[in-house]
Amino acid sequence: NAGVTQTPKFQVLKTGQSMTLQCAQDMNHNSMYWYRQDPGMGLRLIYYSASEGTTDKGEVPNGYNVSRLNKREFSLRLESAAPSQTSVYFCASSEARVGWNTEAFFGQGTRLTVV
Amino acid sequence: KNEVEQSPQNLTAQEGEFITINCSYSVGISALHWLQQHPGGGIVSLFMLSSGKKKHGRLIATINIQEKHSSLHITASHPRDSAVYICAVSRTGNQFYFGTGTSLTVIP
């Protein structure tokens, strides 16, 4: 019963390098999300995908791109990493149905340091 | 201005104490969520509630929709309860808004 699986768990990048964070869920959820968590701040939405084939910007999308490859997978790409992107990143998914209260399921997080 | 405010930010308790964490929100919601995050760990959902009260083991969550307020109570606290507790609300469109979390330390 894997739930939401994120890889990698830890990553150190040099400024300017690129990388992709992978996320997969096995709960057949429609909605998937990428958040970043910084000290003293709540989780902030980077991008979300309400369904396969759609993506939308969240609160802090600059410097990131996403790809909803299929219903299971939602990846987050940093094209040119900056120290300001040092953070803990969480992928989440939910069964998004109009009129239903939806619970979010989170991955284990990726600790990214950009030096 | 954050749509979700939690208090206190930090809390230290002796083992066995009764603990209360508060959450206030300023927007219309479809549900309120309490989440738990252990140091270096992932985030797990403890409760999702839209009215009344829910209980799971030593944890109790209540919500007052009229006052836009929720509380998370931990009875007979234990060191393994040490974690960050996050209040979040979900709205139409399946967006979630998160508080900044309450860091709880329970001392043996």
Image (cartoon, coloured by chain):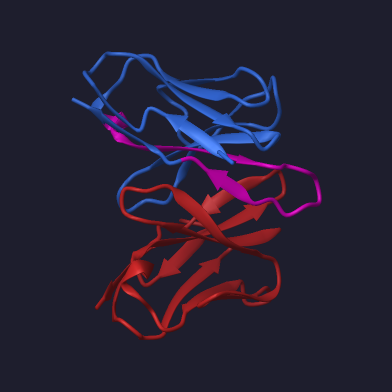
Chain colours: A blue, B red
Q: Quadrant of the C terminus of chain A?
A: top left
- In the displayed image of the protein, which residue is found farthest to the front? A1
Q: In the rendering, at what x and y percent does residue B38 appear?
A: 36, 56
Q: In the rendering, at what x and y percent does residue A86 appear?
A: 28, 33
Specify whether residue A104 is painted magenta: yes
As rendered, which of B87 and A57 lies closer to the eye?
B87
Q: Residue at x 46, y 64 (%)?
A: B5
Position of residue B15 relative to residue A92, above or below, is: below
Q: In the rendering, at what x and y percent does residue B7 appear?
A: 40, 71
Q: Is residue B47 visible?
A: yes
- Provide the residue span drawn in magenta: A84-107
Q: Is residue B47 left or right of residue A15?
A: right
Position of residue A91 relative to residue B55, above or below, is: above
Q: Residue at x 63, y 45 (%)?
A: B95
As rendered, which of A37 and B76 lies closer to the eye?
B76
Position of residue B76 relative to residue B10, above or below, is: below
Q: Residue at x 50, y 34 (%)?
A: A5
Q: Quadrant of the N terminus of chain A?
A: top right
Q: Residue at x 40, y 22 (%)?
A: A63
- In the displayed image of the protein, which residue is found farthest to the left? A115
Q: In the rendering, at what x and y percent does residue A12 appear?
A: 24, 25
Specify whether residue B86 is painted magenta: no
Place residue A82 in its image quadrant: top left
Q: Is residue A9 left or right of residue B33?
A: left
Q: Is residue B28 visible?
A: no
